[in-house]
Image (cartoon, grey):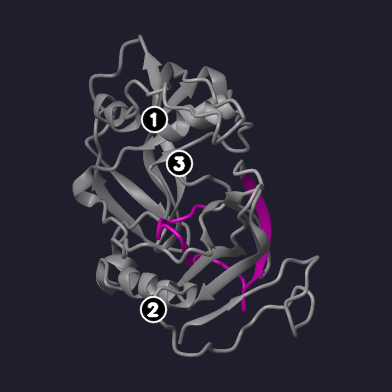
Amino acid sequence: MLTMGCVAPADQAAPGGPTGGASTGPSATPTANTPAARAAALVAGWRAGPGPGAWRGGFVPLEGLSVPPPNVAFTPATRAAFDAGRYTFTGALPSAAPVQRDKITFHQGGVQDVDVVPAAEAYRQLSTGGSPDCGTFDKAVLPESPAPCQPLTITGVRYGLVDLRTSRGTAAVPAWRFTVTELGGEVARVAVAPSAVTAVPEVPTGPPPAELMPVAQVVAIDGAQVTYLAEGTACDRDVRPFVAQEADVVVLGATATRGSGTCSRQLVTHRVTGTLTQALAERAVLDAHSGRLLTPGRRVG
């Protein structure tokens, strides 16, 4: 049974409800184009994906296959470059992986043998950005300067492992690890051959409800408390977390009363906290606005 509710921020009480309380009981039957209806559709789409066999016995990543260094301190410029896949590398790539087959080790138990790709293929998958279009910025809409359009510099590469969230829990996965100057560490690109990777399911892409804001990043998890960043404008009022959850998946969002009149349309990030009925654990997390998979600690992109 899908459990959902709009949750007031910690410093703001919901009308007729306690401060910071979560709605954990079942809601009324969702109607068309409401946050509740969209969450129900996202959960249904998610479950129509790879099926229990692949989910429990295959390799289904629950985050992106390009992994930044742990605790990396992004700047706006390096964040933009990482999200866009903009890299430069003038060195020589290894001609082949040390092995043609390797193992994924699931920390909760289990091993899967997989084919691996060479470094050149991993670099091609990593460096997808091409030349950015930096000439479309409109200061009348967003008065802040955009992040500079600059690539990240790769100075070396080695074969190794990276921890990745999967449908079977966290796993040590074969990866090519690229040393990136601007990030002060290695960006890992999963080296598992595409034939061994089961993609997460496609989700409905219809227009989201007008009051629903996209989630940019899950920034903190403390037991059943999940704090995340929702993107809106300075015109938005009464911003509230929206949480819908099942045993295998959680849908996060934020709702707001959209402002009008003379307020600034400047992009604003709202920090909100939602309460789950139990700890997140290994459940998948979806953005209610876009349907995209969210990785705690990493921005959508």
Work out whether 37 lies above or below 154: below
Tell me if 20 is positioned left or right of 108 in this view: right
Report if the CB atoms under discs 3 and 2 are less than 8 Å apart.
Answer: no
Residue underneath mark 2: 32
Crowd tier of the residue under label 1, counting other residues whose Cα lies within 10 Å: few below 14, some 14–19, many 20 or above: many
In front: 173, or 85?
A: 85
Please report the residue visible at 47 percent of the width from the left and 20 percent of the height from the top.
149
Residue underneath mark 1: 85
Which span of residues is magenta-colored? 268-295
Which numbered disc, 2 or 1, marks the residue that appears first in the sequence? 2
Residue underneath mark 3: 162
Is residue 279 covered in magenta? yes
Which numbered disc, 1 or 3, marks the residue that appears first in the sequence? 1
Residue 99's image quarter?
top left
Q: Amino acid at mark 1?
A: Gly
Secondary structure, mark 1, is loop
Tell me if 11 is positioned left or right of 245 in this view: right
Instruction: Give the x, y percent position of residue 12.
Output: 78, 68
Q: CA distance from mark 1 to mark 3?
A: 18 Å
Report if the CB atoms under discs 2 and 1 are less than 8 Å apart.
Answer: no
Q: Which quadrant: the N terminus?
A: bottom left
Asked whether the viewer can see residue 233, the reply is yes
Secondary structure, mark 3, is strand
In front: 111, or 33?
A: 33
Q: Given this view, does label 3 or label 2 mark the residue nearer the observer?
A: 2
Work out whether 157 lies above or below 292: above
In front: 103, or 286?
A: 286
Q: CA distance from mark 2 to mark 1?
A: 37 Å
Is residue 186 covered in magenta? no
Residue 118's image quarter?
top left
